Amino acid sequence: MPRVKRSTKRVHYRKRTLGLAKGFFLTKSKLNRAAQEAVEKSLKYGYVGRKLKKREFRSLWIVRIGAATRTAGMSYSKFMAGMKKAKIELNRKVLADLAATDANAFSQLVEKAKAALG
């Protein structure tokens, strides 16, 4: 096998790895091999975390909507069923924001959902 002198490619590889590992503890920010392992693991955690974030926010919105509908004397599932029957297409993010900030508008939506069910 011929000898390969990596030269600038190796420098750029190390520089990129150590740049991503900046702020890591002890050798994980100083030595290339430890830094590479730590960076790979952190990138994997970041990828998984971005998926979990969506899941956690959706459950938070559902909890907020459920709490607001309970104060109006209705369950979350019946409220959502009433919204579908009334053909009101608002996503959970907007509904949770309305429940938290504008109680009057949310109570009107609850009344419309009740009317559509009954």
Image (cartoon, rainbow, N blue to C red):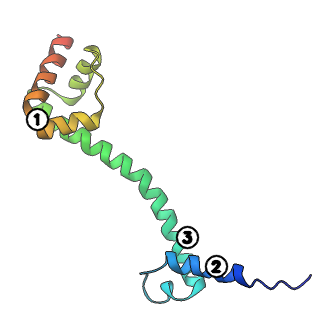
Read off the residue under disc 1: 102
Judging depth in this view, the residue of 57 and 90 nearest the camera is 90
Which three-letter amino acid code belongs to the residue tagged 3? Glu
For the point 43% across and 81% down, the residue is 24
First along the sequence among labels 2 and 3: 2
For the point 32% across and 42% down, the residue is 58
Label 1: which secondary element: loop
Neighbour tally class for label 2: few under 14, some 14-19, many 20 plus, Cα within 10 Å: few
Judging depth in this view, the residue of 14 and 72 nearest the camera is 14
In the rendered image, the residue lying farthest to the right is 1
User: Can you tell which of label 1 and label 3 is closer to the viewer?
Assistant: 1
Read off the residue under disc 2: 12
Q: Is residue 67 above or below residue 18?
A: above
Instruction: Give how far apart the Cα atoms at labels 1 and 3 are.
Output: 44 Å
First along the sequence among labels 1 and 3: 3
Read off the residue under disc 3: 40
User: Can you tell which of label 2 and label 3 is closer to the viewer?
Assistant: 2
